[in-house]
Image (cartoon, rainbow, N blue to C red):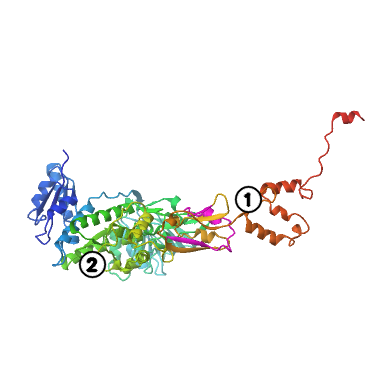
Amino acid sequence: MTPTKTLLVCTCEKTQSVSPEALKAASAAGQVIVVDELCGKDMATAAEHLSGTGEVLIACGQQSALFERLGEDVQAEEGWSAPLSTIDIRDRAGWSAPDANPKRLHAKQAALMAGAQLPAAMAPAKLIQSSGVCCIVGPTDQAIRMAELVQDELGVTCVVSDAGPVQLPSARYDVARGKLTAAKGALGNFTLEFAQLQMLNPAGRGAPAYGDAKVTARSECDIFIDLRGGAPAFPHYQKRNGYFWADPAKSGELEHIALTARERVGEFEKTVYFRLEESLCAHSRANQTGCTRCLDVCSTEAIFSAGDHIQIDSDICAGCGTCAAVCPTSAITMNETPFESITKALDVMARTYREHAGEAPRLVFHSLSAGAEAIAYLARYHDGLADDLIPFGLEQIDRIGHAEILAAFGAGYAEVLMLADSELDRRAVAAEVELAQAMLLGTHNSPSRIRVIAAEHLGEAGDNAGRLSEPVLLVGGRRDITRVAVTAMADKIEAPIPLPAGAPYGAIEIDSDKCTLCLACVSLCPTGALGDHPDRPEVQFTENACVQCGVCESTCPETAITLKPQLDLSKAALSARALHGEDPFECIQCGKPFGVASTINRIVEKLENQHWMYTKSDNVQLIKMCDDCRVKAQFHGDSAPMASGERPRVRTSDDYRDH
């Protein structure tokens, strides 16, 4: 018999109302036990079930560490402890305003419980080795002081950046003087470049001195401590493993850095946050730059160009997911928060809420760090989240793009909010929010149903008048679900929806007066949106496949192509249509079609009687022939330049007998 799951629910001293029936169904538990103080007088109930044979789920996030220790104690005493997991339904759904609707709160608790039952995506990890080689760069007094703090655990080289008094040589660390000019890498693999580097000479009697200066020098290290006091060496330096930048405005900064830096020795696991499918990347073709969206938004500079595609340095990547949110081809996907997992969770929570509340919920995306803390603070000291607002936490809200927002509407949410931890977050999501709002406006719905908010607005009532459309089946990739969701929200399909510049959806326009049908754009299109006709010179276009990468525009030698960002919801966008085509020229000898009629005629017009080779001769006729006929004419014609003389008669032995 399969062991049953037990759900332990705490009312937190009767400060929250719960519905055991709704929670039981959402958690698929065999039994639900409700107590008032599970972390205090009722802890024996938790210990009793942890010593059982079934899985235990405790609806308390605040005291999760306490229950984990309790499980360890049970394991130590009885040699067995039931599998334990915890979930917060109090801060996110239980504690709300005094006039909150209990039906909504219970529906939200059930929705959170149902979402937590979905399997979590697993991200692979890689090993990083750090031998503790440390480079400290900064003013003499601070650099030497830091070296003294970390010298027992790390192998230190100080590169002082000022002309201060020369330090006495030390056997515990090396000293040099120079200017840092470049830095790259991460924990275990930093490369630093210096100008005018001088090593302190440890030998000799008398005052110590620096040696000859090297114009340029390079150094490799595992840990990089930057005490220069100016701008950090890396953008978003907090996310760069192994890099420590001292804020000169903070007291005790050196001691804090030293305490952390000393621990960066040994073998570490680094999560590989992303998965890259190079064949899908539309970055470049034949040295013509196309899509650069991920390069433009990467805050840690972990992404770089590698020819026809991009590459991502897994040592530097901090897993924010912004690149995956803007990638138009899904060449970049996230291992921890894949798009499919997000849409599945959104769908399950919305459906569970509707089943219990009978109305559409609203949704707020938030970070698992500052965002979760803001929600917990709001719940404890104020009125908490609005009773119909379901929170969805991620490491960074940068991970959310227009496709996730529109998937939420497709799942049946009435409003989508994004909780920005800072102004930096607000700017990071601005372009994707603008794109989603443009699509919403194109469906004749209000774009105000998408908002970026601050924590103080989490308790406010919103537009819960009803969902924008009946829930749709969220199956497929980002582009598929975007199209399905927007189509479901549209009152009727009319003209294409205009989108902001840079949007990954759209058409292209070809100036027929300029286009020579060379088909260079067709040969380089990375997504197959552009194609040719098998029987005649023609450029065909499938709009649904176009990601507006711009390779065709930059490739066209005649500058005849213009990008047109839009979203066409009609069925015509799913199939190829002719953009520009002409009749082929027919060979004057055999009648076989070849080339483009207008191009051949233009060449004849420019050369006939205008060039000495095509004056008073039939050479112009060669231009009007196909390849085969042109070769024959050049070899066998009476006036052909490559024609040979009459072939001599074959001689035989009889010819010689006659003589």
Residue 74 location (% of width, % of height): 13, 46
- Secondary structure of the residue carrying numbered label 1: strand
Quarter of the rendering containing residue 260:
bottom left
**Quarter of the picture holding the N terminus:** top left
Residue 205 seen in this snapshot? no
Q: How many marks?
A: 2
**Which circle marks residue 193 in the picture?**
none
Q: Nearer the viewer, mark 2 or mark 1?
A: 1
Q: Was residue 531 drawn as part of the magenta stretch in this picture? A: yes
Q: Give the CA separation, mark 2 to mark 1.
A: 68 Å
**Quarter of the picture holding the C terminus:** top right
Q: Amino acid at mark 1?
A: Pro
Residue tagged by mark 1? 593
Q: Amino acid at mark 2?
A: Leu
Residue tagged by mark 2? 458
Is mark 2 in CB contact (under 8 Å) with mark 1? no
Residue 123 location (% of width, % of height): 32, 50
The furthest residue to the bottom: 249
Quarter of the rendering containing residue 422:
bottom left
The furthest residue to the right: 659
**Residue drawn at (20%, 65%) of the image:** 386
When the figure is inspected, residue 457 is found, relative to residue 579, above or below; the finding is below
Q: Decide which of 63, 380 is in the foreground and name it.
A: 380
Residue 220 seen in this snapshot? yes
First to last magenta residue range = 504-532
Q: Was residue 228 drawn as part of the magenta stretch in this picture? A: no
- Secondary structure of the residue carrying numbered label 2: loop
Q: Decide which of 16, 41 is in the foreground and name it.
A: 16
**Residue drawn at (74%, 54%) of the image:** 619
Q: Is residue 574 left or right of residue 6?
A: right
**Residue drawn at (75%, 61%) of the image:** 609
